[in-house]
Image: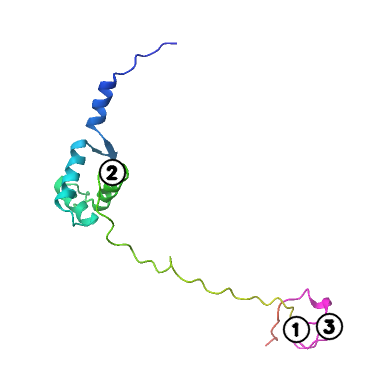
Amino acid sequence: MRHHPLRSKKRWFILLAMVAFRYRGREITQEDILYICSLVKRHPNDSRRKLSTRLCEAWQWRQANGALRDMVCRGMLLMLERAGQISLPPVSYARHNPLAHRVRPEPVPIDTKTVCATSNRSCSSRCGAPAGSLCSTASCRSITILATSNR
């Protein structure tokens, strides 16, 4: 079994310093992170959306159709913040979702009483109850649907 010599730790550290992060194909260097930190410090009252727009304009980060890559940039900023590299301003707007905090309706009680299913006559063969009324004996409990009369 042949062992390969270990790489130099110094060389590996230089590689890490050159490319700190990668987001959707874009390499983010330490210089980029320092620029983002300075951008946040220069505009402390801007929202995250406004900061991402400014960053896209500074980097000329655009889609194929010419629009700014604003959502991609916000995702990158959030990734860098979660990694502890930058500090973003707090979220200024939380979307209103009425379904998330709605009051649940009361459950509807289900009537489990057996209803006689004969259409025009009394249920004399089973319990003797008139058609459409509640059956009182155990012999009719297998029928639970109220049948409508034939029209």
Q: Nearer the viewer, mark 2 or mark 1?
A: 2
Residue furthest out toward the top: 1
Place of residue 84 in the rendered image (x, y in percent of width and height, measured from the top left)? 29, 42
Q: CA distance from mark 2 to mark 3?
A: 76 Å
Q: Secondary structure at mark 1?
A: loop
Q: CA distance from mark 2 to mark 1?
A: 69 Å
Q: Secondary structure at mark 3?
A: loop
Magenta residues (range):
119-144
Kindly indicate the quadrant of the structure image that contains residue 38.
top left
Q: Nearer the viewer, mark 2 or mark 3?
A: 2
Q: Secondary structure at mark 2?
A: helix
* Numbered circle sitting on residue 127: 3
Q: Residue at x 26, y 51 (%)?
A: 74
Q: Residues within 10 Å of mark 3 (few under 14, many from 20)?
A: some
Q: Residue at x 58, y 73 (%)?
A: 107
Place of residue 123 in the rendered image (x, y in percent of width and height, measured from the top left)? 81, 84
Q: Which residue has dot 2 on it?
A: 80
Residue 115 vs 52, above or below: the answer is below
Q: Is residue 63 one of those drawn in magenta?
A: no
* Numbered circle sitting on residue 134: 1
Q: CA distance from mark 1 to mark 3?
A: 10 Å
Kindly indicate the quadrant of the structure image that contains residue 82.
top left
Q: Does 35 sit left or right of 121 as displayed?
A: left
Q: Say whether disc 1 or disc 3 marks the residue closer to the N-terminus.
A: 3
Q: Nearer the viewer, residue 125 or 36?
A: 36
Q: Indicate the amino acid at tag 1.
A: Leu
Place of residue 53 in the rendered image (x, y in percent of width and height, measured from the top left)? 19, 53
**Can residue 67 be seen here?**
no
Q: Nearer the viewer, residue 32 or 117?
A: 32
Rendered-image quadrant of the C terminus: bottom right
Residue 92 vs 133, above or below: the answer is above
Q: Indicate the amino acid at tag 2.
A: Leu
